[in-house]
Image: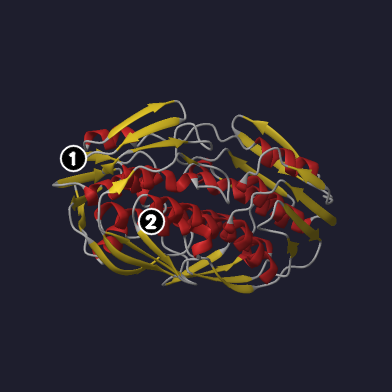
Amino acid sequence: MSEYLVNGGRRLSGSIVAHGSKNSVLPILAASIMSGGVSTIHNCPELSDVVASVKILEHLGCKVSRDGETLTVDSGSLYRHDVPDQLMREMRSSVIFLGAILARVGQADLSMPGGCELGPRPIDLHLSALRALGANISERGGRLNCFADAMRGCELNLSIPSVGATENSMLVACSCQGTTVINNAAREPEIVDLQNFLRAMGAKVRGAGSSTVTVEGGYPLHSCEYTVMPDRIVAATYLAAAAAAGGDVDVRGVDYRQLSTVTAILSEAGCTVRSGKRNIRIISDRPLCGVRPVRTAPYPGFPTDAQAPLMAALACGTGTTVFVENIFENRYRHVGELLRMGADIRVEGRVAVVCGVRELHGAPVKATDLRGGAALVVAALAAEGESRISGLGHIDRGYYCLDKALASLGANMIRIDTE
C-alpha cells in the first residue's frame, strides 16, 4: 500500500505536459484487435487501467510489448473470445471489449464490468445497439454471451449520448455489411480519437465530434501506427491545482478548445488564463472567488470528470458556488474527505453548495474514486500543513506518477510505502 504525503501552501510554477488520454487509449487498445495485424500506439501512459487492458489483450492471445510510452499490439495470434470475470472487474471501460471481440470473431463471452462506484451505469444502451446490428445476446448469472452470424448496418438512435455505447456501436458497425448511422452520438474528443484510429486501420468512419456518426462497414482493416491525444482531464486537474495553490503554470500539448468550459470557470474565479494553439497558461495570485452554478453535462458541456478537482479548488477562497451533477448519482463521495480538511460544503441529492473558507488544513484522507482522489490532491496542495492521502489505487487508474508531475512544478509531494 502507498500514500501521498503532501505539505501544502507552496505556489506552483513551470510547464508540464498532459500525458496520453486514459479515455482514449482504452477503446483504442480494444479496437486494435479488429485488424488482425500489428498496431503501434504512441502516448500510452502506464496507468493501472491500461495495464488491465493489456492483461485482457494477452488473455485473448495477443502479443503486447511496451517501449516507454509506446505499446505494440500484435492481434494476429488472437484465439479466444472470452474475458474472465476477474479482469472485467478491474475497470468499467472493459465493456468496450464486447464490441471489439464481436467485430473480430463474431462471438464474445464476458461478465459485467467493474470500476469506480459512481452510481448506476447500465450497459443497456450498448446491448440494444448491438442487438439492432444483428447480435444475439443472452444474459445469465452476470455474464454476457454474444454471437452473430451476419450483422448488417442500420440506423441507431441512442436515448442519451453515451460515450461507451457510441464507441461499441462504432466498433461493431465496422464489421457489418452496409452503412450504420448513429444518432445522438456522444461528441467527446475521445470519440474523435477513436474514429481517427479506426481510419488509420482502414475503416470508413465519419462524423465523430458531431451528434451523428456514420460507419460504412465491411472494409478490410490492417496494421497501423497512431498517437493517442493528450488527456484533457489530467490537464484540467493541473489547472485546478495551480488555481488552488497559486502560481504560474503552463500546461502544454493540450487543445484549449476541449477545456473551454473549465477555463471559463477558472477565469471567472479570478485566475488569469491565456490559451495558445497547444497550451493553456494559468496565473493565480489571489484567493479564488465563487462563480455561477457549475452544471455537468455531456460534451461540449462542463465535464463531470473535472467537477471534483474544480470543487476542491473553489473550496478554499471566498464566496459560494453551486455544483449540479447531471451525469452520475454518486459523484460527491469526495466531499466527506474535503470536510475533514476544513471545507464548507453541503450536499443535497445532485446539488452541492460550496462556501469558500479562508484556508484548508492538512488531514489524513482517503480517495474513494479516481477524480475524487485527484480532488483531495488539489485540496492538499492548497491546505496549510501535512496531508496523507490513501486509496491511491483509484488515482493510479487515471494519473501517471501524479506526485512526480506536481513535484516538478514545486509541490512538496511524495509517494511513500506504508507497509
Upstream in sequence: badge 2 or badge 1: 1
Q: Name the residue under label 1.
A: 363
Closest to the camera, between mark 2 and mark 1, is 1
The residue drawn where x is 44% and y is 30% is: 351
Q: Name the residue under label 2.
A: 399
Helix, strand, or loop for circle 2?
loop
Circle on res. 204: none
Q: In this view, does 252 lie to the left or right of 41?
A: left
Q: Name the image quarter holding residue 223.
A: bottom right
Q: Is residue 27 left or right of residue 259?
A: right
Q: In this view, does 303 lie to the left or right of 391?
A: right
Residue, far top: 348
The three-letter code of the residue at mark 1 reads Ala
Q: Nearest the camera: 264 or 91?
A: 264
**Residue 2 sits above or below residue 20 on the image:** above
The residue drawn where x is 76% and y is 54% is: 173
Horizontal and vertical percent position of residue 335? 33, 34
**Residue 245 sits above or below residue 66 on the image:** above
**Alpha-carbon span between mark 2 and mark 1:** 22 Å
Res 54 seen here? no
Residue, far left: 385
The three-letter code of the residue at mark 2 reads Tyr
Q: Nearest the camera: 119 or 9?
A: 9
Horizontal and vertical percent position of residue 95? 59, 45
